[in-house]
Amino acid sequence: MELTVPKVKSIIKHYFPTAQSVLVSILAKDPAELTIAEQRVLGRITGGNVTGLTGAQIITLLGGTSRVFHVNAFQYPAPGTDWTPALTGAGLAQNLAAKKVWLPFNFLKVGDIITTYNLVGDVVEAAAATLDCKLVQINKADPITTADITNGGMTQIVADGNFDSTVNCDDTTVATDKQYTLEILGTTGASDSIIVMGAEVTVTRLI
């Protein structure tokens, strides 16, 4: 009896059609092909299948931890006429339209991953108060450019009362030649006022 053995190269080509393919076991079944994007590490986090890990998952495996930082060092474009510094935070008086104040993340290290932030404060709404906020990345360029972080915008606040609004932005890895800040936009009507105490920012950081 004559036995024919397939060429090893053909077998490899069958199972690995591209350079980005590997074989993994899918829930104890037969191995299946998995295509891995560039600069990804294979692993398995708390159940499920072997897959390409995200940057945040890799940092967790390496001993990273989630930390919450408080920021309240506002930057005022027109203090005394628009947003005004106070003991309680940044304040916006009545009858002011579309006024901006900025809240930089001045605690970051390269490699940190920004995951969420909470904006905290109080609105006295008697007429038409609104409050918006978004996370902005500032980029070294000539001229300097800015880009809104995906899903970094807060749901507009219009109701009277204190607020602690959570924004679950896309995971954003802090890189050199970039800065990160909250751009806060407020509008008040007659007898309205807004106070923003600050923000609580959650990052994943390698210890």
Image (spheres, helix red, strand yellow):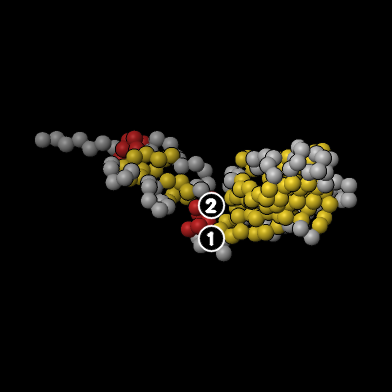
Residue at numbered disc 1: 64
In the image, what residue type sits under mark 2?
Ala
**Residue closest to the eye, 195 or 53:** 195
- Rendered residue at 20%/35% (across/down): 4
The quarter in which the N terminus is drawn is top left
> Is the C-beta separation of discs 1 and 2 under 8 Å?
yes
Can you tell which mark lies on residue 56? 2
Q: Residues within 10 Å of mark 1 (few under 14, many from 20)?
A: some
Asked where in the image residue 69 lies, by quadrant, the reply is bottom right
Instruction: Check the image and report above or below for 63 versus 195.
Output: below
Q: Nearer the viewer, residue 40 or 11?
A: 40
Sequence-earlier tag: 1 or 2: 2
Amino acid, disc 1: Gly
The kind of secondary structure element at disc 2 is helix
Label 2 environment density (alpha carbons within 10 Å; few <14, some 14–19, many ≥20): many
Which quadrant of the figure contains the C terminus?
Answer: bottom right
Please indicate whether residue 173 sits to the left or right of residue 127 in the image: left
Give me the residue at 28% from left, 46% from top.
28
